[in-house]
Image (cartoon, rainbow, N blue to C red):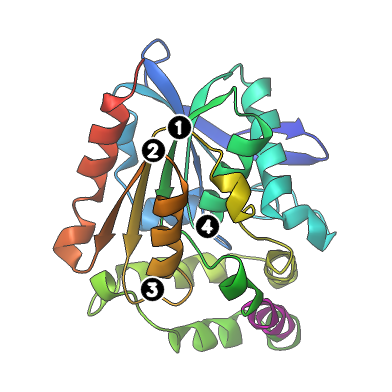
Amino acid sequence: MERIVVRDVELAYEVTGPPAAGTPLVWGHGLSSNKANEDRFPFLDFAALAADRRLLRYDARGHGASGFTAEPTGYSWAELAGDQLALTSALGIERYVAAGASMGCGTALHAALLAPERVVALLLVVPPTAWESRRERVDIWEQVATLLEQRGVEAFIEGMRATVTPDPLVGRSERDEAFEANARAADPARLAGVFRGAGHADLPPREQIATIDVPTRILAWSGDPAHPEGTAQQLCELLPRADLFVARTWDDFRTWTDRAVSFLRSLPV
């Protein structure tokens, strides 16, 4: 991965795909994840997404190979959207499709509001808790941060094993194996910092989201309190040009790449 300093942090990034093709796609990963982790367990086939367009993937501040900043408010999704917009500008990407999973969804939505002339479409995967349900999880993230600081990564991993598995992943170990490898490679203090920062993050207010008039595809799954169907359904109702698919089985989940590719190919060049 290459590195560049934007705003106050060094970000690690990678650009793949043909340069003179469709509108570039910018992908944001989820909380505590990074590019390496998503290479172990990808939500989508990134090679397929990059077949006919540039694909920018990067580690958000505090994650993976990127720099860490200690101030928790720096991890609000509006701040991460500012990082994304600065990074794309530095790389000469002016107009793009904003995409991502979980935290990456929040980043994409904030970017679309901060720079509506630049974000031409949205691809939102497993939207997280938001608004009222988000506030209920602030204490959880603080507890996770404290656990990491006081007892370390192995206790964190053990605690996460007790969380609910999304319906499409029941009986499968791929995501858990990737998560545990990623956690063991992380600095516990940095990991605690990004979880504490998650308490300052939320989706934009509903009335602002309703003004984002760009093509949007939402890919959600069932059975996950951290990424509830309710958020995805509300986003689909709020966004003027959105559609939604909810995966309830592994076979449903395996269709996500085709659904993402067909959506991208439906967009104007």
The residue to which callout 3 is attached is 176
User: Which comes before the other along the chain, label 4 or label 2?
Assistant: 4
User: Which comes before the other along the chain, label 2 or label 3?
Assistant: 3
The correct choice, above or below, for 269 with respect to 201 in the image is: above
Q: Residue at x 61, y 16 (%)?
A: 92
What's under tag 3, amino acid-wise?
Asp
Find out whether the residues at labels 4 and 3 contact each other: C-beta distance under 8 Å: no
Range of residues picked out in magenta: 137-146
Find out whether the residues at labels 1 and 2 contact each other: C-beta distance under 8 Å: yes
The residue to which callout 2 is attached is 241
How far apart are the alpha carbons under marks 4 and 3? 14 Å
Q: Residue at x 32, y 30 (%)?
A: 264
What's under tag 1, amino acid-wise?
Val
How far apart are the alpha carbons under marks 1 and 2? 6 Å
Q: Position of residue 166 (x, y in %)?
A: 33, 74
The residue to which callout 1 is attached is 214
Residue 30's tag is 4
Task: Tell me the element at label 3.
Answer: helix
User: Which comes before the other along the chain, label 1 or label 4?
Assistant: 4
